[in-house]
Image: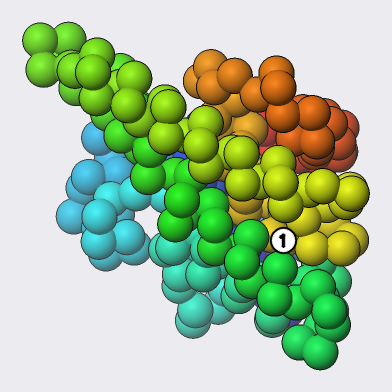
Amino acid sequence: MGLLTLHFAPNSRAVRAVWLLEELGLNYQLERYALGAPEMRSPEFRKIHPMGRVPVLEDGDVRLFESGAIMEYLITRHGQGRLRPAEDDVNYPAYLQWLHYSEGMIMPPINSYMVETFFLPPERQSEVHAKRAKKLMGQMLVAVDAGLAGQVYLAGDFSAADIMTGSAVLSAQQIGVDISELGDLQAYCARLQARPAYQKASNT
């Protein structure tokens, strides 16, 4: 296997890719950018990612620029059976659900909230829309808390599903979503944050 290259910016979905790379112990190098840096909108970078965003994973002739696809690719090509249950495992359906729950349910309101509070100029921001997005985030997290009832992780042992949905949960918590009444989710966040691979990724 050649050296993997990850195009990366802090506080982006690229952090979850680093988290997985670290959990798998894979060798990789980072091409670092500041989030929203002008060079990410250059014609050269748009040949790598047509939307001028991160993450982008390069593995020889393979290039992927969707974080969920990067996760599945790394698990399948380089995971050697780690961080995912086998297809005939009783936990496999839950693994699939939580692997995709992040982008389908949690990240859309996070994206809306960030647009309204950070990316738009103040005169175009809507407090109403921001509050609605934050409320929706909280509702999405209730389902994760319920999914953790009686479990340490979302699909049996720690898996890539915990990286995907866990990273979204931690992002929601960091922007102020109150999870004080969600005891299982609070404990889950603490477990994720204690993992050395998460600490390495979040400080990259």
Q: Is residue 124 in view? A: yes
Report x, y in % for residue 90.
Answer: 84, 79
Element marked by disc 1: helix
Q: Residue furthest bottom?
A: 88
Q: What amino acid is found at the position of numbered circle 1 in the picture?
A: Ala
Q: Residue at x 52, y 42 (%)?
A: 140
Closer-to-camera residue (166/16): 166
Q: Residue at x 44, y 63 (%)?
A: 66
Report x, y in % for residue 103.
Answer: 47, 54
Report x, y in % for residue 128.
Answer: 23, 18
Closer-to-camera residue (4/130): 130
Looking at the image, residue 160 sits to the left or right of residue 13; the answer is right
Answer above or below: position of 70 versus 180.
Answer: below
Quadrant including the N terminus = bottom right
Q: Residue at x 60, y 75 (%)?
A: 73
Answer above or below: position of 32 versus 115.
Answer: below
Q: Residue at x 61, y 39 (%)?
A: 142
Q: Residue furthest left?
A: 123
Q: Is residue 118 in view? A: no
> Label 1 belongs to which residue?
160
